[in-house]
Image: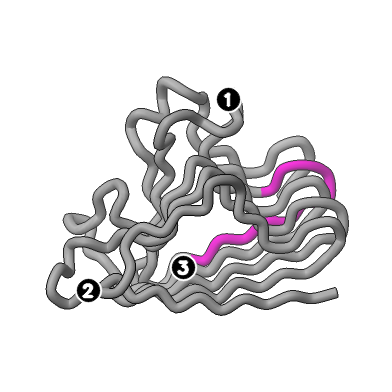
Amino acid sequence: NTAKVDILLDASKISNPTINDELIVGTSGGTGILDYTFISDPTQPEAKRGIKTQKFSLGQGSNSIGQANIFGSGKTISEQTMDNGELITGQLEVASGGGKGTLNLNGASIDLDNMTSNPNPGQPAFLLGSGANSIGEVNLLGGGKIGTSISYTTYTTPTATIGLNEGY
């Protein structure tokens, strides 16, 4: 069972849509693919606010495959500030519980921001490969970035973990 979703978000028509819980791509042995393109508002190029969610997971659970391809217009380091990414989330988890996850950020950024609280206290804001047989991959292309809010240090330590509990 494979599911694919295409999202085209035009910032000149909608700003800061919210998913109040967790956005999961590929779970319970299934395959999920998310293609998400963000188009900046040319009248307000600095207002690059994308989808906001508490947790974003790719490849969650045994034999699950999750892939997200997120496209944006690119940012310089000076343009990268919190809450102006194509995706703003409290926690990013790529491959967990025996799943495989691939995140491709092409000219796009993900902002890890606790928003109101960490959805999983004691867990890292960014987790790549958690659990036996979990394989996670992140590709940053064309100015792609992952940024973490400084306020995370009060909620979780460490902020990022690569390879936890036999994960890759």
Which residue carries the number 1 mark? 121
- In the rendered structure, which segment of residues is drawn in magenta? 129-139
Callout 2 crowding tier (Cα within 10 Å): few <14, some 14–19, many ≥20: some
Q: Percent from the top left, x then y, of residue 20?
A: 53, 47
Can you tell which mark lies on residue 105? 3
Q: Percent from the top left, x then y, of residue 111?
A: 39, 50
Q: CA distance from mark 3 to mark 2?
A: 19 Å
Q: Residue at x 58, y 68 (%)?
A: 68
Foreground: disc 3 or disc 2: 2
- Amino acid type of the residue tagged 3 in the rendering: Leu
Callout 3: SS: strand
Frontmost residue, 161 versus 112: 112
Can you tell which mark lies on residue 41? 2
Q: Residue at x 56, y 33 (%)?
A: 119
- Amino acid type of the residue tagged 1 in the rendering: Pro
The residue lying furthest to the top in this view is 154
- Amino acid type of the residue tagged 2 in the rendering: Asp
Label pair 2/1, CB-CB below 8 angstroms: no
The mark that comes first in sequence, 2 or 1, is: 2
Foreground: disc 2 or disc 1: 2
In this rendering, position of residue 58 left or right of residue 12? right
Frontmost residue, 31 versus 167: 31
Residue 36 within the magenta-colored segment of the rendering? no
The mark that comes first in sequence, 3 or 2, is: 2
Callout 1: SS: loop
Foreground: disc 3 or disc 1: 1
